[in-house]
Each structure stands twice: as structure tokens, then as C-alpha cells.
Image (cartoon, rainbow, N blue to C red):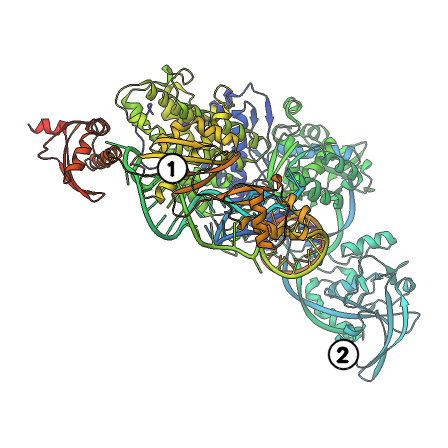
Amino acid sequence: MSRFDPVDDQYDPQTVEEGVFDYWDAVDAYEQTKDHRADGEPYFFVDGPPYTSGSAHMGTTWNKTLKDLYIRYLRMQGYDVTDRPGYDMHGLPIETKVEERLGFENKKDIEEYGEEAFIEECKEFADEQLQGLQDDFKSFGVWMDWDDPYKTVDPEYMEAAWWGFQQADDRGLVEQGQRSISQCPRCETAIANNEVEYDHVQDPSIYVKFSLREKEGSLVIWTTTPWTIPANTFVAVDGDATYQAVEAQRGGQTETLYLHEDCVEDALEQGGYGDYEVIEEVAGEEMVGWEYDHPLREEVPDAPSGEGTLQVYTADYVEADRTGLVHSAPGHGEVDFERGQELGLDIFCPVGPDGVYEDAAGKYAGEFVKDADEAIMGDLEANGNLLARDTVHHDYGHCWRCDTGIIQIVTDQWFITVTDIKDELLDNIEESEWYPQEARDVRFRDFVEDSPDWNVSRQRYWGIPIPIWTPEDWSGEMDEAIVVGTREELAERVDQDIDPDTVDIHKGTVDDLTITEDGTTYTRVGDVFDVWLDSSVATWGTIGFPSDEETFEELWPADLIMEAHDQTRGWFWSQLGMGSAAMGEVPYEQVLMHGWALDEDGRKMSKSLGNIVEPGEAIDRHGRDPMRLFLLSVNPQGDDMKFSWDEMAEMKRRLNILWNVFRFPLPYMRMDEFDPESVDVRDAETELVDEWVLSRLQSVTAEMTEYMEDFEQHKALDALLSFVVEDVSRFYVQTVRDRLWEEDDSSSKEAAYATLYHVLEETVALFAPFSPFIAEEIYQNLTGDAGFDTVHMKDWPDRSEFWHDEALEADVAAVRAAEEAGSNARQQAERSLRWPVTEVIVDVTTGEDLTASLANRTDILAERLNARTVTVVDPEEDWGEITFSAEADMSLLGPEFGDEAGRVMNALNDARVTEQSLDALEAAVEDELGREVDLTEEMVEFVRHTPEDISGTGFEALDGSGSVYVDTELTEDIESEGYAREVIRRVQEMRKDLDLDIEERIAVDLDIDDDRIADLVREHEGLIAEEVRADEFGAVEDGHRKDWEVEGVTMTIAVEPLAAAEASD
RNA sequence: GGGCCAAUAGCUCAGUCAGGUUGAGCGCUCGGCUGAUAACCGGGAGGCCUCCGGUUCAAAUCCGGAUUGGCCCA
């Protein structure tokens, strides 16, 4: 690409982006940029690894775009940024996908297929998925180290998990224990609570009578899981509640039933009872110790019967719902289990990991629990213990992968006992900065406070094997188990001969390894880690620790991580837990927590709703840079993003303005062979607007930097875009056009070139992290061989005090406000900008700074409003037929007038007084309200009103406000220039019709119907000739000829290029 | 069922911390400009600030409750 080459008229993102991809490849842009910062201060960013199933959706795209933005920005700030991407590749989701692929039904199929072969399939699948994700991320223009991602399935990475786990064990935080867990009976594994999805289902709803042993009557319980009745161990009541014994009639029989006082009515109705009588009231507390018979004793002889079982206890999970007495089975439910442990009761769980009753379930042995519901209800009915049966619609947990209904059972699991170090966890939270901070102090803290021990074991195949070896008759004490931390240690301790550098430590390999020490042989426990443990070690796994200690010492902990808010309970938490357990500290210093990508209606994107927007489609429709700008224009802190095609299209439009601003000076620079290297903008003869736009650039740079440091890139982007649109395009370029169109070389033109060049070069640097493609395209075109090979090697701009000039910016802000009002006044007077006006009066109502700024800059205001003179009238004087109302300062009016303050305010708003005096206002308010008021200077600010028939328009700027009036009286002088400019415009249009080159000379033939006008126009022939590059006025024979109607005057204009005329001679 | 977050113009969002007459961009509409031209500029319309209560002279803003949506948990 050579300097100032012509570019497409229209910004076409896809063309730019494809060109830039090729260019980056050709110059090794990414590698060069990294090398360029290799000696910079290290910055340790850690990528939260996306899970390798499915493809990149809008949320992942947002996430990676944010990461790319901040990485690029930090590099421009001079940091040597760690940018290793990661992938989370183990776990049940991939196993189930592979099972589907292979047509498997359950674990037996896997065993038959062979564990090792199955693991190999999983790895292949995960690798395929990884490739797809990488291609997506690259296509978004994300610059990370794609050649060397960290993968949670690499032995080096898996070792990081082993090491962390061993550290936790050294601190005494690892134990095996029984817990009530959510089990997927198909996957035959525990699944984490957050992996349980709740669906609406229909289940049995039964009321069961438990006959009391030493008293007349029965306790009544309610459940939706008849299959847990065999494991019933106790009944829970609310100690503070009142229970009633009722004698109720049904089918000619009288029964005595115990129910919560608030539940009697409903429960009896469910059971179809008629009359009843309350015969006793008893506090829950008093019922403790009452014994009852197990309702399925005959069917399940092994049902609980030991010390303390089949009695009433209090529990805090009891509510006055259904019966107010709760069937409790510590072998199943989580709260039942916890209360059972407290009470020291035996745990009875007759259900296997596959959800099938074991022998202990007596009659029901061999049957799948949900299938046994029917038989159990039948038996309860038969033995007279069923009070009522019905069905109920409710939410019930299902496996997130295979949608099988989960069951609660008690099994042996491995835990990291984070509850032992909860205080430490809570302290460590304080060591990281969160954006937004409240997320840390409220949501995260709450979650950590309530978090139970971390169940890290899964009874599956595709995961990091838990590195624990136990002897055959293990006591359960961790002292007597071996926890291996590294591959090196593994090779040293196992009986078999393995090479630590090449050994794969997946289940297929390590399950066969044994350790023999002091005559005892240890075998590995079968489980693998919960996949959340994998990513929890990412901060050291990313940098190859524990094999690579040096990098660890240099970088750890992470400077920054950024993920969506669902990771509060996920990665933010797992890292805190593992980091604290293994390292004693939180492994990240800053967290940027963003939201989720929702659809245009604010609903989450999902397959079932059919509202998913693919990033690929966005790229096809609008391009990468516009997509990125849209994603980056959204608040990244905590809030969800509503996707919007319209906003994305708008971003493309904004970039098109950038494109126009960039391509606008190119033809001139080319023509004049402008050489940026020979003109330093500091030495150029810059004019007011040049200095102004350069100052604005400094302010915008400083503003952006501040926002970027606070992780508010959406505000930074907003500042940048409005700089380009408002300041550069709408003001600077408009102003500077005449100077570039000048034919002769001039210091003014050169200063404009130098200014534009400098502004554009710095502006694209500011764009570089946001929209890397268009920034590169423009940068390369501008700098040619003189710049870096890529814009991304540039430093982030710093505010230059040389150019920064706040007073000048204030002046121009005032001028622009007055100009806008002036244009409006002109429009009201129907006098187009082409026609000069004799005078513009700017009447300043309030504001010393405003008056000073405008008075300073009447020349530029005159130029922009095409006025012969501009007069600024200061606030001490009045001009024209103005009336005044007043705006109230409610913080003063409120206390003064109390509940009448609102009415006083309205009266002030409605007042129209002719002088700016408190007396006049007071009189007007009194008129309106019928009472006297005392106003002070501080309470009111005068607002002026212009009579409707005067062409005046109000404006506000800086510290004040005012009005602009335009005097549109015509003089011959003005008519002369006005008509001349009308001619110029039309000749220009005809030049364009002919598609003439900018430099082309022409001959112009003017034939104006009205002699007076013709004479007036002739006075400006010189101006016309200069503006339209005409060498001759006179008869044109073959030229482009056109009739025009200008302000009621007919004129015929003919234009002929002179080169053509000569050629035809 | 519980915790946290959000709701302001047709759309996307500021304003809410620190109560005092609701703003921007886009879209719509009317007009202007014309060697950046599929660009650019100006005017206008468009808001019971989700709803119901409370505190206050005064609430988009503070408090309580509801509705809808999002995340997390049960």
C-alpha cells in the first residue's frame, strides 16, 4: 500500500477486513507487536477457558472482544501482556455428546467399548470443537496466542490441578465423606447443584399416615417421592408450631390424625374426610420423641429401626405446608441428611448409583426407583397407611446433559473442605478489585458465605483423575492415603516404569498404576475431578506451573480476568476456593464482570426460543469492526447487553464518517505531494481551527485514557466517536475545505494538511484496540513506509500540553452554540448560507465567560455564519423586544415557600416581564398567585423570550446563554455576492456532472436573463473564476449546457473543459 | 421458593450514589447544503421516567410492595 492511495468511495468493512487479514499475515503483525513489547513491564492476563462444546455465540464473542480490546490497549500502554487463550475440555457435556455419537445408553456401554478408547474419542471430539472455536475467535480479529493455547487435557495442565489438590491436602483440606448429592442415574455420577436444571413435571402427591406406637393415632406426612419412603428414618416438626390431634370420619370409620393447626382443613379435605373434631393441641416441641411404626416394614424389613430412629424431631426446614410434618430420609435429601448427622442417626440409602433399589430395599430390590412409585403407593394403600393420593405439577431437577430426572442419594465423595477456611476466603475477597465493585461486596460475598464444602469428585471417565491412592482396607484417614502432586512424583512412587515427560495421566493410564510403600500396596481411587476444578487452577496452569517455576515467580497472581456474571458462582468462585486452599490467596487482582448477551427483546438467546444471533451473520451483514464497536459500546460492568442490529448498523455509519474524513484530504495531499515527514505540525502556521481540533484531540485522548483505566470502554468509545463525528467531521473538515481547495501552495494549506494528518494518525491509534481493521487500513495508507508495520505497535496517545488549550476549546464551544442558533435564525428568515447577511447580533443574556469567548472570536463566527459583521451584546445591555421569565432554584424556593414552592415555580416560568428585575418578577408572581412573595437574586435565573416574528434563536453554552439575531436586509453588494455564489455552486455541480478531475481547467458561458443581476454577477467574475477553476468566460460551443432557475431569475450556464476544447481545435 | 441486578422517547442508553422544572444518539418528519455527496447541516413531533403505596415543601432519584426480564441458588 503506498501513501495516500485512492480508496473506495464507500467504506466496505468486509473488503477492508479481508485485506487487513492478508496484510497482517504478510508482515507478521501480531508477532511483531508482541516482540515490540517484549521488554515492557509484564502484565498477566488470564483467559477464562470457554468450554469446548458448541460454537462461539454472541456472549463469547462479546467476552473475547472485550479481552482483545484491553489486551491491545495494555500493549499500547507498553505492557508485555500474557495472552495465552485457554480451553476447558474435560467433563460430562463432552462425554454425553460422545455417547450420543457412539449410540451409547449408559455406563455399561462405555465399559464394553473400553475406557481408554472412550477417552480417546472424547479427546478427539474436544479437539474438533476447539478448532471451531479458535477459527471463530480469530475471525473476530482477536489477537491471542492461537498457536499455543492452554488445554485442560494436556498432562502439563492436568499436573497443575494435581499440584493444587496436593497443596490443599497438605493443609488438611481434603477428605472423603458421605454427602447427599444430586445423582444422575443415567450418567451414574454426582452432578453439581448448579448443573441441575429445573423442569416442570407431573409427580405423585401422597399423604401418608405413620401410626404412633404408644399413642392412639397417626402422624400425617406429605411427599412427592414415594420411592424415598422405604428410607424414612424420622419425622420432623416445627418446635414452635401448634399441632392438633383431630378425630375425623371417613367411610364410617373414625381416625385420630396429627396435623399442623394450619393444615388440618386442607389435609382432611384431600383425604375425603367428613366431620372432624379437634381433641388435643400440642406444641411441636412436646411431640419430640414420639415413636411410630415404619409404614413399609413388611415390604422393606431392613428399613431403619436402630437407635433413635422412627421418632419425631424438630428441624428448621419444616413449614406449615400440606401437613406441617416432614418425612425425613437422611439417606436421600440434603437437609434430611444434615439433620440426621446432627442427630447421630444411621444413614440408610437402599438405592444404587444407577437409581435401582439394592437388596436392602426388600420387595422393591432390582427396580428403578421412579418405576417403583406405583407399587409403593399400592402397598401403602393396601396396608391402610395411605391417606390420599393425587398428582402435582411442580419443578423437578434434571441432569443438564441428558435431561434425566435426578435423584438425591447419599454416597461417598471427595471434598475440599472450604468451609474450614471460610474466614480466610472472605478475607481474600478483599484482596481483589472488582468492576463493578458491588458485585464483589454483595453477590460474591453472599455466595462465599453460604458455600458448602466443594464436592470435587465425579464417577466418570473424561476428566483429570483424582490423584489419591489408598490401601485396600483404608481407614478413611488422609494420613494413610497418598496424594500425588506431579508427574515426577508419580514416576518416582509408582511400581510401574513410566516416563514423567511423556506419560498421559488420564484415567486409562493411571488406573493401572499402583504404589507400594512399607509393604502396603495402594491403588488409585476411581473418580475424576469435577470439571470446575480444572479451570480453577488456570492462573498457574496457564504458565506451566509447577514445571515452570520461574515464570510463576515473575507473573503470579493474575493482574486481570474478565468473564460474565454467571461466573460469580463459577470461575470467580472456584479460583478463590482453589487459590486459597492451595496458595493461601486469591489468584487474581482485578475482575471485570460483564453481563450476558440477550436478544433484541431482552430475552436470553436460546435454541428453543429460536432467537440466536450468530456472530458470523453479524460479520456478514455489517462486518467485524462494526460488530466489535457495537459490543464495545455497551456497559461492560455487570449489566446485560441487549443485542441490536440497528445499533450495529449505526456503528457502521459512524465508521463510514471516519472513512470519509480520512479519504477527504487524500486527493489534495496527493496532488500537492504533501510530505508529512517534512512538515511538523508544531512548526506549521496553524490557524485557530487547526489549534482547536488539535486541542480537542488532547482532551479526548485524556478522557478516553481515564475511562479505559476504569474499565468503562463504552464511554471511551463514545468520546472517540463523537470527536470524529462532531468535532472533526462536522466542524473541522467543514471549516477547512476552502483552504484545501485553494490552488496555490500556501502555508495555510500546508498547516491544514499537517493538522489533518496528525489528527488522523492519532485518531486511528485511539481506534486501534476497538476496531483494529479500519484503524490499520487508514494508518497504513497515511504512513506508508514511514510508520510501524502495524498500527498496533503504536503507543497509546498521551495528552500533549503543547496543544491542549482549554480556553480555546471553550471559545469554540461558544462559537458553535452561537453558530447553531444563527443557522436556525437564518432558516427562519429563509436566507440560505450562500447569501451573506449584513449583520449578526449575538445578545448574551448571562455568562461572563460566554461573552468573553464570543467577543474573542467574532471573526470565525462571521465566517461561519457568512455575515459581514458580528456584534456581541453583553449581559448589561438589552437588545430587541425581549421578555423575561425566570427559572427557579428549587433548593432555595423549597425551604422558603414550602408546599407553595411548586406554584411559585410555575408562576415564574409563566411570567413575561420586560425587564430583568426582581420587582417585575414579584409583581408577575403576585398577579398569578394573588399573594406577595419575596424573591432574592439567588432564587431565580432570568430566561429570555423572543417575539415570534423576529428571527432570533436562543442558545446555551459555557456559563451562560443568549440569543442570535440575523439582519437579512438586502444590499446590492450582498445580492452581487449571493448570485455569484449561486452561479459557483451550479458550475461546480456541472463540473461533477462531467466527472472532471479536480485540477481540470474550464471555460464558462453565462447567460443571465435579468440585466441588473447579470451586472451584479459580473462584479464577482474573479471570485467565480477562482472557485470553479475557470480560465475563460465567453461563448462555449460544445460544452455541457444547462438552464437554471435562481431566486426567480433564469440563467443558462455552459461549461467546457479546456483540454477537450483544445483537442477538438 | 430465596439472593442479586435491571426497567426512562418507537429503538439503544445517560441521568439514580449526593431528591429540586428528564437528556443524547438513532429512527420518524419538515427543511437546508452540494468537489466528503449512498456524505453533511438545521428545525419539529415524540416521555402518567413499569405499576401501587410511603417519606418529603418537593421523588425518575430515597423507602416498602407488585409486575416483567436477566443471573445465581433451592
Query: Which residue is drawn at the image coordinates 63% and 62% (left, top)?
Result: A200
Residue most toward the bottom?
Answer: A252
- Quarter of the image for the C terminus of chain A: give it: top left
Q: Where is residue A819 drawn, in percent x and y?
A: 40, 35
- Quarter of the image for the N terminus of chain A: give it: top left
- Which SS class for mark 1? helix
Taking depth in this image into account, of B48 and A22 the one nearest to the observer is B48
Q: Is residue A452 visible?
A: no
The image quadrant of residue A1029 is: top left
Specify few, some or many for label 2: CA neighbours under 10 Å numbering under 14, 14-19, or 20 or more: some
The disc, 2 or 1, on the residue closer to the chain's N-terminal end is 2
Type of the residue with mark 1: Asn
Residue underneath mark 1: A656
Q: Is residue A904 above or below residue A202?
A: above
Type of the residue with mark 2: Gly
Mark number, residue A272: 2
Q: Is residue A591 visible?
A: yes
Q: Where is residue A637 drawn, in percent x and y?
A: 59, 40
Residue most toward the right?
Answer: A214
Q: Where is residue A935 drawn, in percent x and y?
A: 62, 44
Taking depth in this image into account, of A681 and A55 the one nearest to the observer is A681
- Which SS class for mark 2? loop
